[in-house]
Amino acid sequence: MKSLFRVLSLSAAVVLAPVGPAAYAQQTTEVRMATLAPSALLWLHAIAKDQGFYAERKITVKDLVAGSSPALLQAVSSGSVEAGISLGDVVIRAIDQGAPVVIAGAVLGKTILRLVGGTGVTTIKQLEGATVTAGAVEGGTANLLRFQLQRGGVDARGVKMVALTNSKDRVVALGNGQVKGALLIAPFDTLAEREGMKMLDVYTEPYVQTPLILNKTWAEKNRETAIGLTQALKKAAVWIYEPANKDKAIEILAAYTNVPKETCADSYKFMVLEQQAIGRNLEVQAAGLENIVKIDQAIGVAAPAAKPFELSRYYDPSFLAGK
């Protein structure tokens, strides 16, 4: 009888073992992340996946690609997804209108958009009255292009803006003369340059092009996971600035965007070494959001601010602080 009892006890232990504390420790939490199409805008996200920074936090990120920036914001705002890497101008407008989202960090603290001239265009002034594209015809990216044209002495009201949301399509349009100028993100700006086109301008001031955003209700109820997600991207932001990681970072971007490594090497030079566009430690500068608003005001699409800019209205630094 004692032998039988020992056998039954051992059998029960085998059956029950998987549900013990060690097994639970291996479980991960899924977070649905809304993104745009693969590009250097999402370089840190690709790094965090490849290097296991999400996995270290016991998080599995499920990517859901949105067709547009407003659609991405709506997905996060509605709770269809828990998080997203959005465009800064869209987030500002949404929060001003009461959307339940919050910025947890700056994936890109400066823009990686560069104004590229089409075949035969070597100066911004040659874009006077021309057909140009910033992807969309309105919103933050289009407004940045209008600002750059205005700053370069071009009447932005006289250009024709056309919608070409795919970066590769913009490169083709520059080459065949469909447009004379375009804002391009890395690594597609380099592809255009290698086809003989000229870089005309880049905005170098702080500009939160892509913040990490969270659904506020979800983040409040799942604070540990929200912090873990933010910390994983923060670790990627630190990792990419380490010189020893340069080659691997280039390899990750090349695989993620399906662009040759040598092109991505130029993107590394511009984004990491020159523009230093990736938010160091994912920190959000007030100027990075405020400059988006000032650009809108400068080109006349927004009225002067009635009160001082308040960073805390949009950004909660506690997720970066890990508290």
Image (cartoon, rainbow, N blue to C red):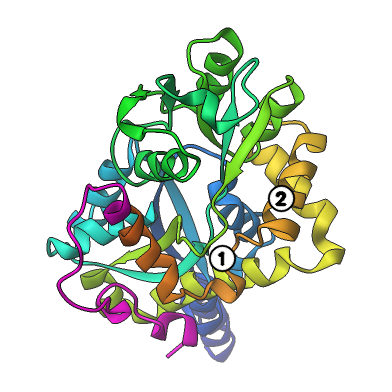
Q: Which residues are magenta?
A: 296-323
For discs 1 and 2, the disc positioned in front in the rendered view: 2
Q: Indicate the position of residue 157 as horizontal and vertical percent values.
A: 30, 31
Q: Indicate the position of residue 36 as horizontal and vertical percent values.
A: 43, 41
Q: Indicate the position of residue 44 as horizontal and vertical percent values.
A: 60, 58
**Residue at 43% in and 61% down:** 211
Picture layout, residue 292 above or below residue 7: above
Q: Nearer the viewer, residue 283 or 64?
A: 283
What secondary structure do most residues of the magenta stretch adopt? loop
Q: Nearer the viewer, residue 11 or 30?
A: 30
The residue where tag 2 is placed is 270
The residue where tag 1 is placed is 54
Q: Residues within 10 Å of mark 2 (few under 14, many from 20)?
A: some
Q: Is residue 195 left or right of residue 186?
A: right
Residue furthest to the top: 176
Mark 1 to mark 2: distance in Å? 26 Å
Q: Does residue 291 appear anywhere in the picture? A: yes
